[in-house]
Every structure is written in C-alpha cells, then in structure tokens.
Image (cartoon, helix red, strand yellow):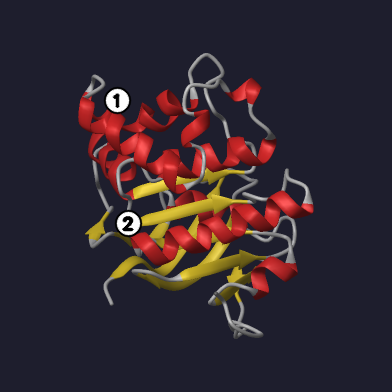
Amino acid sequence: MKTIVELQDVRKSYGLGTLVETEVLHGINLAISEGEFAALTGPTGSGKSTLLNLIGLLEAPTSGRLQVDGVDIAGMADATLTALRGRSIGFIFQFHHLLPGFTALENVMMPSIIDLGWPTTEAKDRAMALLKQVGLQDAAHKRPSQLSGGMQQRVAIARALSLSPRLILADEPTGNLDTHSASEVFELLQAVNREHQSACLIVTHDPALAARCQRQIQIVDGQLLAEKAPAGPTR
C-alpha cells in the first residue's frame, strides 16, 4: 500500500531563538498508508493539535522530514503548499465551519469552486452525489441553520471529499454531537474510508471510538507511545 503521510524524526519548537523557546514534538516517526483508519489520542497538551497541524500542512516542522502524498514539503513555496493541502487533504473539525449564507450543496461545492475559480456542472454533480452518499440529498438546498448538528457534520464530511483527497484529517469530529449522532458520524467516516480508500486520521478523546479504529496512535509529552492493537473488529 502507498504511504500517504510519513514523518521522520520530526520536531517542532515555538519561540525559536528566544528565552522561552519550547520544543513541543520530540523526534516523531510515523507513517500512515492508503486506506488506513487511525485514531490519534493523548491528554490535553500532549502535542496532538501540533502534530495534526503539521500533517495538515498548516505548520512546518522545525526539523526532520515530512512527506504528504509522496511529496517532501521541505522548502516548498507557500502557494505550492496551499495547492498540495487543498488537493490532497480533507479537513473535518468538531465545529463544522459551514458557511451560513450558502446551502448544503454550495458548501460541498466550495473546495471545487476555490480550486477552479468558478462553479462547474461537474462540481455540482459531484457535490450532489456526495450529499446522496451521506444521506442528505433531500437537504441539498437547505442552509446550515435549517440542519441538525449531525446533519451539518455530514455536510462537512461531504465537503471534505469534494476534491477526492488522499488523506482525511478529523479533529474531534463527534465531540460536539450527542451519542447517537456521534455513532452515526463515526460509522459514516468508516464507510467513506472503505469506499474511497482515503487514509483517515481521527483525533478523539473518546476511548470507545478510538478502540473501533484500525490503529491507535498515542502521543504523550510530544512523543509517540507504542501503538495499541484494536480490541475487536473495526468495521
């Protein structure tokens, strides 16, 4: 299987050259392959968000090597980095960040509109197909305020798939939902992972959800611990 993300001895420090310089990640080595479904867990302040930001190309490592979809990001220009991030990575957040003035369909189309510069028939057709996949084709023309929290998160998942990313990063995607909706969203992510074979990395504080993933990647004090094997079937 193709490696989608690879980190080799990656370190991240803040306040470089100052008296308060702090290293947050200490020599991270990690590889995530095509089609993997993994959980990233750890206590508050462990470095989860920093690691996710690096993998999502929102920040750059202080040292070490980071490759995404076979591309080494070292020395990459901002515009090229932005293009790689837009095409290779889909983001899903705890708070879905849908645009309130646009319909569900338009929100799902937005990455394609940004990528191409204008809406196309193909982008609209794909967005409608994705809404159908997440069970919301009948809500295509509703605005976010007309949708429940679980429905809005489904729209966010469809939006993340708009450009067929090789990697999906989900930061506490069920953390703002009730138990039933959270389980539905998690199962939808699993279905998306199976169908699209996108690698999926989910940050979660929920040990029950983490146990349902193929891999459990734990980070404590900026270092990865030995991985836990799944307790049972992941599907």
**Residue 146 picture location, percent across and down:** 64, 22
**Residue 109 picture location, percent across and down:** 36, 29
Q: Residue furthest right?
A: 178
Q: Is residue 23 above or below residue 111?
A: below
Would you say residue 94 is visible in this rendering?
Answer: yes
Where is mark 1, residue-wise?
113
Q: Is residue 121 above or below residue 31?
A: above
Give the side of residue 230 with respect to residue 191, left or right: right
At 62% from the left and 49% from the top, the residue drawn is 173
Q: Is residue 167 above or below residue 102?
A: below
Q: Type of residue at label 1?
A: Ile
Query: Which of marks 1 and 2 precedes in the sequence?
Result: 1
Closer to us: 223 or 190: 190
Where is mark 2, residue-wise?
166
Would you say residue 17 is visible in this rendering?
Answer: no
Q: Quadrant of the N terminus?
A: bottom left
- Cβ atoms at labels 2 and 1 below 8 Å apart: no
Quadrant of residue 230 in the image?
bottom right
Q: Secondary structure at mark 1?
A: helix
Q: CA distance from mark 2 to mark 1?
A: 19 Å
Q: Which numbered tag is attached to residue 201?
A: none
Quadrant of residue 166 in the image?
bottom left
Q: Residue furthest top?
A: 101
